[in-house]
Image: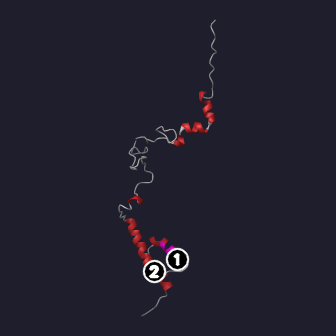
Amino acid sequence: MGIEIANDLLTILLLYSIPKSYENFRIAIESRDESPSPETLKIKLIEEANARKNKEIPNIHDSQRALYTEKKKYEGYRQTESRQPDTYGKRNRHNNKKFKLKCNYCGIFGHKASICRKKQENKNPMLNNNKSFKNNSATVQPKKQNKR
């Protein structure tokens, strides 16, 4: 019963027979100007399956270790050469210690440069002029009288 199927039709049949998880792959192949031959599609599918398998089970060699990380996105780090996780960390449910942080502007521990008071004062000179006044009120000192 030797029925021959055209290469384009065979490619389309193969594309629509792959699992739904390969939908992005299928769309990428369909969006090409020319559809690949069934042999080329078979090779591409095998490469994609191998890439997905390697992604699920990372096999990290020492030369690739610098390019791969499993750390959480928001995990704090100390600013040291070793880049070890910060044991102090930000305050959260599990860790009640305060985040020990040094301001890059004034050098004082306990705040960031974005909320530094000295930086705010230097940006706004009116704050420097009004520093001697408390709550926008001035105190008048009595004149010294000369005793004669």
- Res. 60 mark: none
Picture layout, residue 117 above or below residue 92: above
For the residue pair 98 and 14, the one nearer the viewer reads as 98
Residue position for label 1: 30
Corner quadrant of residue 98? top left
Could you tell me which secondary element the residue under label 2 belongs to?
helix
| Residue furthest to the top | 148
- Prevalent SS, magenta region: helix
Residue at image coords 59%, 37%:
122
Give the x, y percent position of residue 61: 35, 63
* Mark 1 surroundings within 10 Å by alpha-carbon count, few (fewer than 14), some (14 through 19), many (20 or more): some
**15 to 97, vertically: above or below:** below
Residue 42 point in image, percent of width and height: 43, 79
Does residue 102 appear in the picture of this structure?
A: yes
Does residue 61 lie above or below 37 as drawn? above
Q: Where are the magenta residues, as a range?
A: 25-31
In the rendered image, which quarter contains the N terminus?
Answer: bottom left
The residue that mark 2 highlights is: 40
Residue 38 in percent (x, y) is at 46, 82
Q: Residue at x 62, y 13 (%)?
A: 144
Q: Who comes first in sequence, dot 2 or dot 1?
A: 1
Q: Secondary structure beneath disc 1?
A: helix
Disc 1 residue type (three-letter): Glu
Residue 134 appears in the picture as rendered: no
Residue 40: say if magenta.
Answer: no
Way the structure is coloured:
secondary structure
Disc 2 crowd, CA 10 A, few/some/many (<14, 14-19, 20+): few
